[in-house]
Amino acid sequence: MIDHFSAADVLESLTTNWLGRACQVLPELDSSNDLLKEMVREGTEDDPPAGFLLLTHYQRQGRGRLSRRWDAPPGSSLLLSLLFRPNWPGSQANWLTMLVSTAAAEAIASHTSLTVGIKWPNDIMVQLGERWHKVSGILQEGEFDGNGRLQWAIVGIGMNVNIPAAQLPTGSTPATSLLAAMGEPVSRLPLLTTFLEQVEARYEAVANGRSPQAAWQEKLITLGQPVQVTYTASSQSFAGVAEATDAGGHLLVRDAAGQLHTVTAADVTLRKK
């Protein structure tokens, strides 16, 4: 199922107050995050405002966390980037990933009958039988000012909506799409609208002093599970049990010797019990 839509279609369907009200929809591009970063860094009077949405129907060089590629056939998925100008302290930088991933999980759950969870820190997963499969991923990038406050941030998301099972990517974490999981296509525009509504509501809750950690942690399928933590820069790894997250969204993993590790950036995979 290929259901192309335009920026005018997006604006007509929106119920948000500000998120996505300024938007651009392109047939294809290299990377929505990279293009939006260029737009922000040009420093012109026409800088995109907070809440700007850049969406494409095909991404030639899509990428996810840890520089992994993110591929999807044209017109099959939701591939987009959102711009935020939060002016939050650096300790709250991960809150954007928390609230956006929670919003994505809620949007998928509201448009399907699937059981949806989040694999720390930003993979949206659906349960098929006894296994969890990745259906969406998030990549956050941004810049801090001289006082360590988050000046602006771009959150990109790729959501596998109508990719046929035969065209799904392969990897250590099994992938799926809503089409493959449900056996029927899902219209992308209503899904996008619900997702943006969820993001705006959760962002405004943070602006009113409410941390997104509790709602995000509640959906983490990683907690209470045996995991393997691998630091990609050094290739060092250790095994343990994921116990909780802290206020900044870092994963707390206890190893076999009883030592509690605070994991800020690493590849965390679920191990068999």
Image (spheres, rainbow, N blue to C red):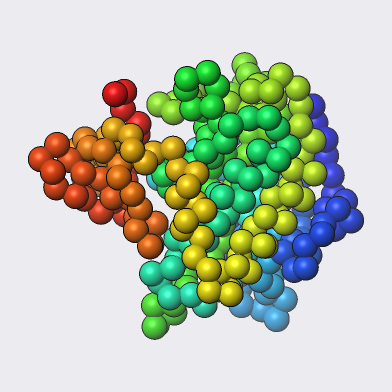
Q: Position of residue 35 (x, y in %)?
A: 62, 57
Q: Position of residue 118 (x, y in %)?
A: 49, 41
Report the quarter where the N terminus lies. top right
131 over 74 or under it: above or below: above
Q: Does any portion of residue 74 appear in the rendered image?
A: no
Q: Determine the residue positioned at 14% across, 47% down.
A: 259
Q: Determine the residue positioned at 43% across, 68% down.
A: 92
Q: Determine the residue positioned at 41% across, 44% down.
A: 120
Report the quarter where the C terminus lies. top left
Q: Is residue 2 left or right of residue 233?
A: right
Q: Position of residue 182 (x, y in %)?
A: 69, 23
Q: Which picture quadrant has residue 147?
A: bottom left
The front one of 188 and 242 is 242
The front one of 211 and 81 is 211
Q: Is residue 81 left or right of residue 186?
A: left
Q: Does any portion of residue 126 appear in the rendered image?
A: yes
Q: Determine the residue positioned at 39% across, 39% down.
A: 222
222 over 128 or under it: above or below: below
Q: Which picture quadrant has residue 49?
A: bottom right
183 over 29 or under it: above or below: above
Callout count: 0
Q: Position of residue 242 (x, y in %)?
A: 30, 42
The front one of 63 and 19 is 19
Q: Residue furthest left?
A: 257
The front one of 244 and 228 is 244
147 over 117 or under it: above or below: below
